[in-house]
Amino acid sequence: MRPVGKIRNPIVVILLTIVTLGIYGLYWHYEMFKETNEFDNEGISGIVGLLISFFCSIVAIFLIPWQIGETRKRAGMPERVNAIYGLWILLPIVGIFIWIVQVQNAANELWEAQGAVAA
């Protein structure tokens, strides 16, 4: 059985990121990379993803949806998100929120298809 990631509410991700002044956002980046990497041993690991997110976050904005999309394809699901989703960041203020919702929902669908249940 493959390890599956945690189903998260994207609104909670946004709120925790705001309340913690971005610290939870880095943790979330780490988890997105780690969970998709552990699922099928492909892509960027959690710690490497965290380093990329910390030192060059604009790259991570493109890598996270790419990695989730690739993991979904390998699991036999439609890609749903890809690196192009990083362009949401260009939309002032609301772009990052749309990005988080789209990326987290795509990850949630992947984990639900693998049998994960919301806590």
Image: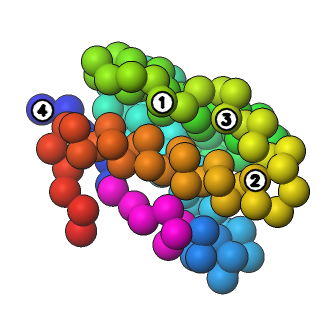
Q: Are marks 2 and 1 in contact (CB under 8 Å)?
A: no
Amino acid type for the residue under numbered disc 3: Tyr
43 or 74: which is nearer to us? 74
- The residue singled out by tag 3 in the image is 85
Element class at badge 3:
helix
- Amino acid type at mark 2: Gly
Name the amino acid type tagged 1.
Arg
Q: Looking at the picture, how far across and down is residue 83, in whole percent?
A: 66, 27
Counting other residues with Cα less than 10 Å from the Cα at mark 3, is it few (<14), some (14-19), or many (20 or more)?
many
Asked if residue 67 is positioned above or below residue 103 in the image, the reply reads above
Residue shown at 39%/61% (left/top)?
8
The residue carrying mark 4 is: 1
Marks 4 and 2 in Cβ contact (< 8 Å): no
- Mark 2 and mark 1: Cα distance apart in space: 17 Å
**Marked residue nearer the N-terminal end (2 or 3):** 3
Left or right, 6 with reference to 15: left
Q: CA distance from mark 3 to mark 4?
A: 30 Å
Q: Check residue 58 in the rendering and tell me which mark sits there, or answer none.
A: none
Are circles 4 and 1 on residues that touch, CB within 8 Å?
no
Q: CA distance from mark 2 to mark 3?
A: 10 Å
The residue wearing badge 1 is: 80
> Circle 2 sits in a helix, a strand or a loop, which is it?
helix
Callout 3–callout 1 Cβ contact below 8 Å: no
Q: Is residue 22 magenta?
A: no
> How many numbered callouts?
4
Quadrant occupied by the N terminus: top left
